Amino acid sequence: MNEADSELAAADFAARGYELTDDLKKADAVVVNTCTVRQQAENRALSQLGRLEGWKAARPGRKLFVIGCAAERLGFGTLRHKFPFIDGVIGAKALDGLSEELDKHLPPAGDGTGPTAGGETAPASIFSSPLSAYVTVMRGCSLKCTYCIVPSVRGPAAFLPEEEVLQQVRRRVDSGAREIVLLGQTVNAWREGERRFEDLLDSISSVPGVLRLRFMSPHPLYFTPAWLRAYAENPAIARHLHLPVQSGSDRILKAMRRGYTAAEYLGTLAKIRKADPDTVFSTDFIVGYPGETAADFEKTLDLVRAGRFGFAFCFKYSPRPGAPAKDAPDLSSPCGDITDREMRDRLARLLEEVKITGRDIFTERIGRIEEVLVESARRGKTSSNFNCRLDRECAPGALVRVEVTGAGKTELSGKVLP
Ligand code: SAH
Ligand code: SF4
């Protein structure tokens, strides 16, 4: 989501005739997009800001902007107090205001009459392949998972109207995108009047030029029988789903207010696998939620074995100001009842378990026929989200059928079928 917001910010600059550069020395402006979902992410953003002091001082006229969730949480006052050289702060709820902020601080690049100066520019795909484009379909979140700061910094859920989403999709396809990645905190909860998420997927995949659709992150509570039917019938929907579970212990899931039990979560995976047995899942876990016992943690390991994930992001619990769990009684020490050492041990064991099943899922692709979206002459990505090396050159942007012949360390290799 932050990557998508960074692309929107880049488009605001492009509309003023500015270009992106990887070279800090050349930059006239820097935008630091901050995350606050865990304290470590926020710390990283703040130390990045600290490092920019010298850059800012080296040439007069340079501008430094801070956007995103830590900007929202800390606000202009706190950030300017810590880093007096910052020019502008635009919190996650007010990203639409970036353009106005830039007007205050930046002259148009060049003589201001360039082809894009003053106009509108579609966001470029900066973070993934140019063939893949993020499209935000909802902002904020209205669930109340107790560990989570997102609703407080991004606000309640708001769904973008279908027409607006389709307009964005068409613009991205016109600039070369073939894969669309829909974004939202509970993306599959999308609705507008009678229209539901599966209707949105169908209308996007019928836009000429859209070859593949991904979305992130769906929430286990919002998979309906109608969605499952659409998934089974619409091959444009990628066969990889990132479905965060957080824990395998019902006690912890309840304390987190996730709204499902481990068995219900696994039941959802089973239903999706029934709609397409080839689906690859990935997930998120939090270890060391306040009160998590060794027995709770064992249940998480059981869930890894039963769920069979291609990969998983595993996080140590991080208490967040503004998240409901911050006020839970057992949060007197920074990590509740669990020592930091135990937390690290659990994280290491979890990562090990995830690696074992992940490797199995990866090597099981050998012998299968996969649909690959070609990204460069000899490389592409399978619908199940694995990188794949091709045995012959293909046109970037094409969908080809590939027989998987090998599984290396990080990518598959395959034979392109006629
Ligand atoms: N909306 C998504 C998750 C968004 S946050 C969902 O509910 O599925 C991305 C991930 O960060 C979460 O899935 C969770 O694993 C992790 N996370 C969020 N808050 C956290 C915290 N306080 N400590 C540790 N991990 C956290
Ligand atoms: Fe919303 Fe829960 Fe996801 Fe946080 S973890 S964004 S509260 S669904």
Image (cartoon, helix red, strand yellow):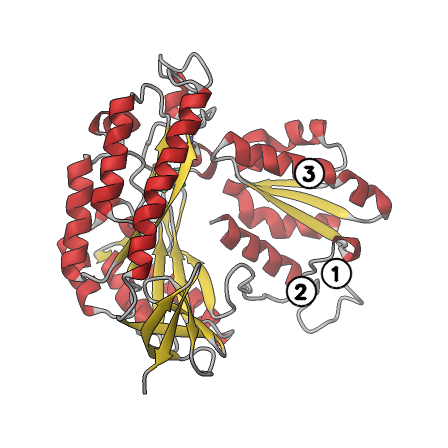
Q: Amino acid at mark 2?
A: Gly
Q: Secondary structure at mark 2?
A: loop
Tell me the tag on residue 108.
1
Q: Quadrant of ligand 2?
A: top left
- Classify 327 as above or below 242: above
Q: Measuring from the top left, give residue 337's x and y in whole percent.
A: 37, 15
Q: Would you name the residue on which mark 2 appears?
A: 118
Quarter of the rendering containing residue 57? top right
Q: Residues within 10 Å of mark 1 (few under 14, many from 20)?
A: some
Contact, CB < 8 Å: mark 2 with mark 1? yes
Residue 100 disc label:
none
- Helix, strand, or loop for circle 1? loop
Residue sitting at 23 percent across and 39 percent down? 303
Identified at 22% across, 36% down, the residue is 302
Nearer the camera: disc 3 or disc 1:
3
**Label 1 CB less than 8 angstroms from ligand 1:** no
Q: Position of residue 412 (x, y in %)?
A: 39, 66
Q: Decide which of tag 3 and tag 1 comes sooner along the chain.
A: 3
Q: Is residue 252 visible?
A: no
Other residues around mark 3 within 10 Å, as few (<14) / some (14–19) / many (≥20): many
Disc 1 marks a residue whose amino acid type is Pro
Query: What x and y, as percent, mark residue 105?
Result: 74, 48
Q: Which mark is residue 49?
A: 3
Whether the residue carrying mark 2 lies under 8 Å from ligand 2 is answered with: no
Q: Amino acid at mark 3?
A: Leu
SS at mark 3 in the image: helix
**Residue at left offset 24%, top offset 54%:** 193
Front residue (pair 96, 14): 14
